[in-house]
Image: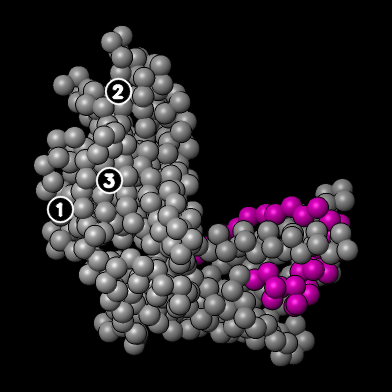
Amino acid sequence: MKPFSFEYFKPNNIDEAISLLNGYGEDAVILAGGQSLIPLMNLRLARPKYIIDINKIAELSYIKDTNGGLSIGALTRHREIEKSDIIKSKYPILSKTVSLIGNPQIRNWGTIGGSISHADPAGELPTLLLALNGKVKVVGNQGEREIDGDDLFLGYLTTSMEKTEILREVYIPEISPKMGWEFVELTKRSHDFAIVSVAVLMSIDNAGKCNDVRISLGGVGSMPVRAKGAEEFLLDKAINDDSINEAANIASEEAEPESDIHASAKYRKEMVKVFVNRGLISALDRVRG
Amino acid sequence: MNFDGNFKFNAPREKVWKFFMNPDMLAKCLPGCEKLEAKGENSYEAIVKIGISVVKGEYSGKVELKDIVTPSHYRLVGEGGGLSGFVKGEVTMDLEEESDKTIVKWKSVAQIGGLIAGVGQRMLSGVAKILTNQFFKDMEKELTKEESL
């Protein structure tokens, strides 16, 4: 378990990091918490020539509750998010989701920016970002730009960020306290990659009809996806066992998982049904208080 | 790992066949192909560099075209390896006419071993499908390009 040799840089600020990234291009890689990259390097599956370690850039680590949303610096560790009181009270789905990532050691090191830019389709945060209507701010030598979560993930470990851009901040729009939520996942062991994960946010009006719903699925294909068919079905409908069951069926039908060593595509489809069902029931319980 | 599919080309079968038998075109459209050199009749030596994100590998090996039935069928048999693992497999191609269009039906059987199979298994079949689609799309692009010349 030893990596190939590489050259190591530890820039003091973002500008330095960007100029290094520009200089070394394809052969360089950003090291944040290292919880995905380092194992891949030690297994020699990843053999980058240049490592740009951004851990010294303290300005990338923050949690800011602003008017209308939450801004989290890319280098913020999962554990800081998990323990944040403001997130526990105003964005509880984020606290819970982060608590499901790996184990405490992984959460002590792993960062929100690293997890999202690594774009593992079974990772918790990419899946959640979609349900939260979140976006990321990325910066390169052309300046800064925003990318909606919906436009960020392109496939396995692939995002729409340029090779020379760094993820700087994750932004999550405010969640109404009236919204019910849940994040559930199926794993063989608690810290494994999810076989299927489901994020749900839902609110209902006074008549008991759904007026906002977002369901995203992880682990069922090359990138996390929104279960659009199930969402459309639920909107403006009375939420009860029947409509929840039907929405879970629709989500299962629209999911296009692959088979792998952990689970067959058929099993994953079935589990989408089960976990969307569970997620919606739990979200409804929370809406009703 | 077995998978199959089909792809429709907007060109007559003779033309598509010629394309599929042309090593220069194959080299151009095979994702990550760095070299495809003829080593004998219908046999080639190849170097491909494929991967996703930080997980990239270089593989070298031999490719042979077998059971050629002009202009409708052939079998591409290959094996190769690199630092991250090895692959051994074959793709059967069947070209069917549909009025002035061609449907290429392909079926592949692959054995993948070594590091990449153990650790990368979770994403292998998905990535293989993406690369295959990319190959057919690039072939179509080249075909259209030639037609417009």
Residue furthest toward the top? A207
Q: CA distance from mark 1 to mark 2?
A: 28 Å
Where disc 3 sits, the SS reads: strand
Q: Which residues are magenta?
A: B1-30
Three-letter amino acid code at disc 1? Glu
Q: Is residue A258 visible?
A: no
Which residue lies under the disc numbered 1?
A80
Circle 2: is it few (<14), some (14-19), or many (20+) Cα within 10 Å? many
Same chain check for tags 1 and 3: yes
Q: CA distance from mark 1 to mark 3?
A: 13 Å
At a point 78% along the width and 75% down the height, the residue shown is B22
Same chain check for tags 2 and 3: yes
**Are the residues at dot 2 and dot 3 in contact (C-beta closer than 8 Å)?**
no
Q: Quadrant of the C terminus of chain A?
A: top left
Q: Is residue A81 above or below residue A8?
A: above
At a point 77% along the width and 55% down the height, the residue shown is B9
Q: CA distance from mark 2 to mark 3?
A: 23 Å
Tell me residue B130's x, y (percent): 55, 59
Residue furthest toward the bottom? B39
Please give the label number shown on residue A203.
2
Where disc 1 sits, the SS reads: helix
Task: Report the chain holding disc 1.
Answer: A
| Res A226 → quadrant | top left
Q: Which tag is nearer the camera, tag 1 or tag 3?
A: 3
